[in-house]
Image: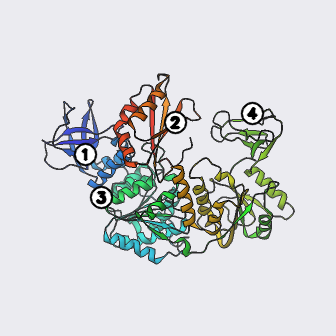
Amino acid sequence: MPYYDVSIPLKLKTLTYYYESEDDLKGFAVTVPLKDKLYDGIVINQRLDKPERVKDVKKIETLWGQVYSKNFIDFLLWMSFYYITETGTVLRLTFFEEIMSYLKGKKKQNRLNTEHKNQKEKNFLDDLSINQDTYLKIINAVQKREYKTFLIQSPNIPYEMKLMTEIAKKLSSLNEIILLILPEIKEVKEIYMFLRDKLGENAIMLHSKMKASECYSAIEKIIEDKAKIIVGTRFALFAPIKKLSLIMLSQESSWIYKAEESPRYNTREAAIMRGFLDKCPVVLCDSLPSVNSYWNSIRGKFEFIDDFSQYPHPELTIVKQPHIGIFHPEVLLYLKMYEKEGILVITPRTGFSLLRCAECGEVLKCEKCSYSLIYYKDNQTVGCNRCNLKTKTPDSCPYCGGIEIHPTGVGVERLWKELENIFSKRGVSIKNYNLENEQIQGVFIGQAGKIRKSYTSQFKGIVFVDFDFFLSIPDYRAVENAFGKVLSLSHLVKNDGSIFIQTRNPESEIFKFFRSYKFREFYLYELKHRKEAIYPPFVRLIKLNIKIKKTASEDVIERIKNFLKLHIQAEIIGPLKTQKKEEIFFIIRSQDKRKLIEDLNLYIDKIKSFRGISLKIEVDPVTLKV
């Protein structure tokens, strides 16, 4: 009698049941008994013998039919192994509720998405062009039906969207099924509406903000093989598509692709594995591909395509951030020359500035979490953006008692006041930048990280002030992220425009890469330093975040540390403190990447069994900040 391992969408490993059938039921939806209740689940594996430690094996109550391909089940098993989590936790990502509703005939009101652009309205994608050689390479790879990963350095985000739509139109006509993934819902909607105009209901959309009825309708079309183009956020990667022809991922280095809930997967890595198992090409696009992805192209795992250099780009100028005042003379002249054509000035922080003690040199920090406090000059307060602490501005330094505390760095408030002083007699409007700005005339202010994306070139120039903030973030990816931030906004600038970066160290080696768009030199520089510092891609990092409960013994962390050192063949860094007293974390680092995953899968239950703790695991953390 065959036995079957079944995964239930709970925080559980697989459970074993029997069924009076000799068929391979892998991928079938079933109903099974568990603790006097019935649960729906998926058959993950068939086994000939009963597990040794299991005494009483119960019978599968109901067999509903196959909904997942065997390749998709292998993908779920890989997710469980690689991200060191239960199969049930992974199953919850896979639209299981909608699938079971479909199988049981509990159809929700069929509600098609009504978001649809007027076909007569011109779309910003219409006038864009793409590299035909790149287009043909992807089409040919799909037709060969072989796994291959392309890494495309694109000129900008609109180019990636245009490439996606052109590929989608061609492959849809060939009856292929493709998955287009973008980091933000706004971008998903743009491409979906464009494709609906061109291809009708062959295109569907999947993202986390959809109504339940809309999500059900989309999954129903996928199950019935009526959807040819699936456009979505990372959420869409787990759609039950039986046979994929192509996966395309826009802005592959985006931090948004890292899931925040368990399993904390990286969409890029998961997409590559799904493509490998489905034997279909995977296309990764970005104006600055991640260092890890570029390393894979050097090693021959990815085929690198340079489309960035095929198109013109704004001139990039590095100038010195002045100690007195905000703007370098060259930047100030540029602002005054091109104010009527629109200039966007970007600052890294809100408020007026930070505060620094002139006597000890310390920047004032939050007493709870040690983040730098933001100074708000208008109401004379300081605040922490991390824990929302707000207090009156101190009269003296909390570290040395000094009374000379001065603003340092540039926030939105300070930038606004400086620009008003410069242009008060010239009649130039100073505005906050947002997507509702109809006329781009005057000087606009934007805070980095809060600038909503536009897909058209609107400005004559962009000025980054206090750029050193981005480089001072204590993260091994700081330079990569800073360069990526510049490139992600560069498409807002017209081709005959300019980008200015103000820094206190313009002669730094890294800026020679920025200045001339020398990407290969930049990647080699980063790889050299990461290898020396023992950081990815040369090692695997895993972060263990441990919350200590009141029931824990005083020595529980020391015992966990000793257990890790005894059983995990890797470097154990920590315990390290977080801003919360009841939480600590360990960083585990190893050059033997697979062995580290295997060891933790083997011992993770024993680590979780330590009394008085709860554990969160993050494989390949995008940042080591707490």
Mark 4: which amino acid? Tyr
Which residue matches tag 2? 574
The quarter of the picture where the N terminus appears is: top left
Q: Amino acid at mark 1?
A: Val
Mark 4 or 1, nearer chain start: 1
Mark 2 or mark 4, which has the lower sequence index? Answer: 4
Label 2: few (<14), some (14–19) or many (≥20) C-alpha neighbours in 10 Å: some
Residue matched to label 4: 399
What separation in Å lies between label 1 and label 3 (alpha carbons)? 16 Å
The quarter in which the C terminus is drawn is: top right
Q: How much space separates mark 2 and mark 4, taking CA atoms? A: 27 Å
Alpha-carbon span between mark 4 and mark 1: 61 Å
Q: How many marks?
A: 4
Query: What is the three-letter code of the residue carrying label 3?
Result: Lys
Cα distance, mark 2 to mark 3? 44 Å
The residue under label 3 is 242
Q: Position of residue 232 (x, y in %)?
A: 44, 57
x then y, percent, for residue 134: 45, 74
- For the residue marked with disc 2, what is the amino acid? Gly
Query: For numbered disc 1, what is the local secondary structure?
Result: strand
Q: Can you identify the residue that label 1 sits on?
A: 43
